[in-house]
Structures are given as structure tokens and as C-alpha cells.
Amino acid sequence: MATRGQDRRAQTAPASKHGPERSIDAVQRTLRRLLPSLAHLPLATSGAVRRFADDPARGRAALERAVPSVGRRRSGDDLPLVALDRAVAEDRYGVARELLDRIAPQDPARGGAELAVDRLAGHLHRVAESATSDARGRRAVRRARADLQVLGSPLPTWCAQPSEPRGSKEPRILHVVTNSLPRVQAGSTIRTQRIARAQRDAGWDAQVVTRPGYPVTRGEAWARAREEVDGVTYHRLLPWIMPDEPRIPEVYARELGALVDRLRPEVLHAASDQVNARAALEVGRRAGLPVAYEARSFFEDTWLGRHGSDPTADTYRLLRDRHTEILLSADVVTTLGEAMREEIIARGVAPDRVIVAPNAVPAPFLALPDRPKSAVRESLGLPAADLWVGSLGTLNPDEGFDTLLQALARLRADGADARALIVGDGPATADLRELAGQLNVPVVMPGRVAVADVLPWYDALDVFAFPRHDTALNRLVTGLKPVEAQARGIPVVGSDLPAVHEVLGPGGALVAPGDVEAFATALAGLLGESVRAERGRAARDWVGQTRTWPRVMEAYRAAYSFGGISAA
């Protein structure tokens, strides 16, 4: 006999669908997915077509970024000229430089190849003024002239005029960024999400907008103009077609302006790089809105470290000039640490207009339960060992994981079963695998892991490594992952650089950058479980006291007060 509850469920539950009805539902779901794809087809194809017409290798590289499944090796990929074209298209200066050395001086293609590599090295005027009949050289000349047109265009002077303040107790903030979760998982996209989430938790209406074309031009032709990610609204600027590079600033300002007219925010807060900030300043000044700028990095220094390290290069000088204009023009600048703040002030920004909002973790991150490391490792398929050391993040050469692997080799030579766990992907992935094999150091490299699934990979570690090399960028820009690791009670060993020092609590250890012996010694001091536990507790307490988003929110209250926002 059916109970009363069962009778009620029987009366209210929808009838299951069979045959034709199920087929109709499937067709409707397919159409809902296809219609946005068809609407964005011109946008998805226009940028790729332009790239292919301008440079076939660049077009192919863009297509493979959008649709990784097409990235198969093809005949001739291992030839020096073909490989050089590929390296140039992917902006890999070091590889292109090595390949150029394999092309004989008497080879007719040598001159054009030199121009292509010279443009990557940032010598734009030299390349733009070159006369060449070689197709590769002509492409380099066109690209150099386009770079000069974009980078040589200063910010309009009227953008430097401050806006009239507006008062509001519950401000609506529109964050202007390059890309976002869930497709792009990086420190910057995670930070954007957490800032907006924390601001919404504080009662502010924080929303986010991404750069024109994203994520359609990254392969998501079905993307919609509005998306929710964990309670945060993301707006997508999706023009009919993707403009060529010189017109992107114009289209960006136009599309962002239309969105601002609809949303009517009280403040625009752009995040690195200067392309986002320029659009926000143009739109904000026209609309009379205060504009904040968050300097999360110095992209000119990133470029310099990966393109030959010549500070006289045109590209570096122009990138620095454009970025400095933005820093001077914004109503207020937020940044990640004191070393970055000092650099911004050194460029002429008034000290009271530069506010530090450090990397932080959500408060619940500290309260998540701890599982025995043996159980966590078993769930991930990791064997038992004396010491698991590693990191999570983008694997760039300047992150210094070569130092880590060499230090682990020293420990293993002394009899310790020390292993590496390096989660993420990037330009250094293949080189790190090769080095680990040469050193006979066991390393697990699972690639990128979704943000929602990252916690066990932290908890599997005994020690978090932050062995950054000594570069201009690494001396200034702080990291997020060491803060997250310490929130999980994991001690950190890092390079003794100002930006690294800022993100290490009392349980951390600092060693000279690139000093393999010192790094190995610091790790050896953490072989004891009780020592790691004590230092991990100290690190977690420090994060709880200084690096949670509710605490960092005070920095944003101060920042928005410059625009007349009374964010109580």
C-alpha cells in the first residue's frame, strides 16, 4: 500500500518521457548549443583567418590553442625553417634564436629568418625599416610596423584627468580583465574570482567583464554573453567579427562602453595588462566614473626576461612607457605587495594612491579538514616516500624547478627517498621531465588540475617549493600558491627575493636563488615529520591572521574611497 508521501510524489512527479518526446528534448538541447555557435561563427573564424593570411604558422598556432586536438605533427615540422616559423608564431624567442643558428649564412632564407627573430627580440624600428623580398622577411616587417602602431600610441591626455567622485554605500564594481575561469586557470583568474566573490560577500555588487572575443576565440564558439561562476557574473564582449590588432583598443572601448551604459557601475577596476586599463580609462573618463587599476604584474619585465633581456629594445621601452602612463592616469592603483608598490611609486605615482591588496585565501580554506597524508597520496596513486616536495602553477623556466630537481638529487645521493610532485603545465614542462630523468629523480607531473580538485595535490606535499630564479619580475611580483600551501599547513622553502619574502610566514625558509646546495640543506632540515608539523602550524596561523580575503577587503575599501565610494 502506498503511503501518503508516496501518493503525493506520484501526483506531482512528471511523467517519464519515451520515444519521440525524448528525441525532441535532445534536438532542443542541441539547438540551444548550436545557435550561439552559429551566431559567433564570424567572430570565431575572423581572427583565425587574419592570422593565417598574415602568417600561416601563426594561424596554425592560434587554431591549435583553440582546438588542441588539431595539434598533430606534420611533415617538415622538424626542419629548421619550419620549426623557426613555429617558434616565432608561438613567441618562443630562445628556441627561435637556437634554430636561427642552424640556418647557414649562405641560405637565401637566412635574411628573412633573421628579421623574424630580430622582431621577437624587440628591435621593431630596425625591422620595420628593412627592405626585403623574402616572404618571411616581409611578414616580419609587417608585424614590426603593426607593433609600433599599437605600442607607439600613447594614452589620450584627457584620460589622465580624474573623475568626479560618486558616493555609494553599496558600490557596483565592474572588474575589467583579460580572461577568466573556468577555461583559463591561472593565478590571475583565480584572484579575479576570489576578489569578486569576497566583494559580493561584503554586500557589494561586483561583476567581471573579459576582453573582446574571449572565450570564443579560445575555441568556445557556444559561449554566451553572460556567465555565472560560483555566484559571480562574467560578461563577455563578443563583437560580430574580431578586429585586426591595431583596431582592438577602439573595439574594446566601444564594447565596454555599451556594457557600462547598461550596468551603470560606480567604479571600473581594470587588472593588468595595460590594454584592459586603457579601455577602462577611456570609458570611465567619458562616463565620469572613477577608474582603479590593479597592477598584478609588470608585463614589460615578463617580456624582457623571455625575449633576450635587452632593456634598449623598442618593445620593452614602449611596453614600459604605456604601462607607466596607465599607472599615472588611474585614480588609484592596487597591487600585490610592497616591492611592487615601491616600483610603482618610483615611476611617479603618489604614495597615497598606491594600496597593497595581497594575495589571500578564502577563510573556509583554512578550516577544511586535514586528511592523513598517506590516505591522500593513496587516493592520488602516489607511493610512500621520505619527502614529497613540489609546487603547483604555470611551469615557466624562471620558476626555478631545475634548482628543486637538482636539490632532490643531492638528498637522494645522501640516502633520502625524496620525490618531486609538480602540478601544472607550461613552457618548461618537457625540459623538467628530461632533467628529472637525467638526475634519476622520481617526479610526478599530472599537468593542470581543475581549481575545484586542487586541494588533495596540496595536501599530498610535505614541503612546498618556491625556488624562483633571480629576475626583475621575480624580485617584484608575489605568488598566490605559496599562500595557499601555507593555509594547508605546509612549510615553504623559497628563494631569498623581496617578493618571495613577502608571502612566507614564520614557518618558511629562504635560500639564495639558484643555490642548489642551500636548497638541499633547507629540505634536509625538514625531513623530520615533527619539524614540518611545527613549521606548518606557524605558517597556517600567519595566513589566518594576515592573508584571508575578509582582511584584504579593507584594502579595497581604502582604494575605492579615492573614487568617492563610501564602502561601509
Image (cartoon, grey):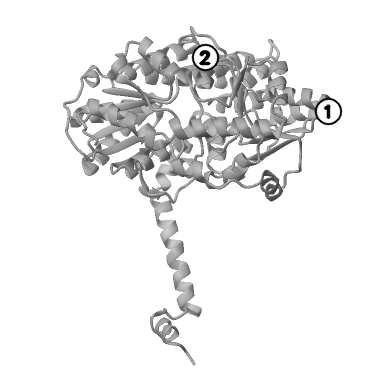
Q: Quadrant of residue 533?
A: top right
Question: Which amino acid type is marked by label 1?
Answer: Gly
Residue 136: x %, y % from top left: 56, 21
Q: Residue furthest top?
A: 312
Q: Is residue 428 left or right of residue 196?
A: right
Q: Quadrant of residue 266?
A: top left
Of the 4 image quadrants, the one containing the C terminus is top left
Q: Is residue 336 left or right of residue 524?
A: left
Residue 323 or 362: which is nearer the viewer?
Answer: 362
Q: Quadrant of residue 547?
A: top left
Q: Residue at x 45, y 20 (%)?
A: 298
Residue 110 or 287: which is nearer the viewer?
Answer: 287
Question: Which amino acid type is marked by label 2?
Answer: Ala
Q: Label 1, on which residue?
A: 415
Q: Label 2, on which residue?
A: 472
Q: Is residue 321 left or right of residue 425?
A: left
Alpha carbons under labels 1 and 2: distance apart:
37 Å
Where 229 sits versus 157, above or below? Answer: below
Q: Element type at marker 2?
A: helix
State whether residue 505 appears in this view: yes
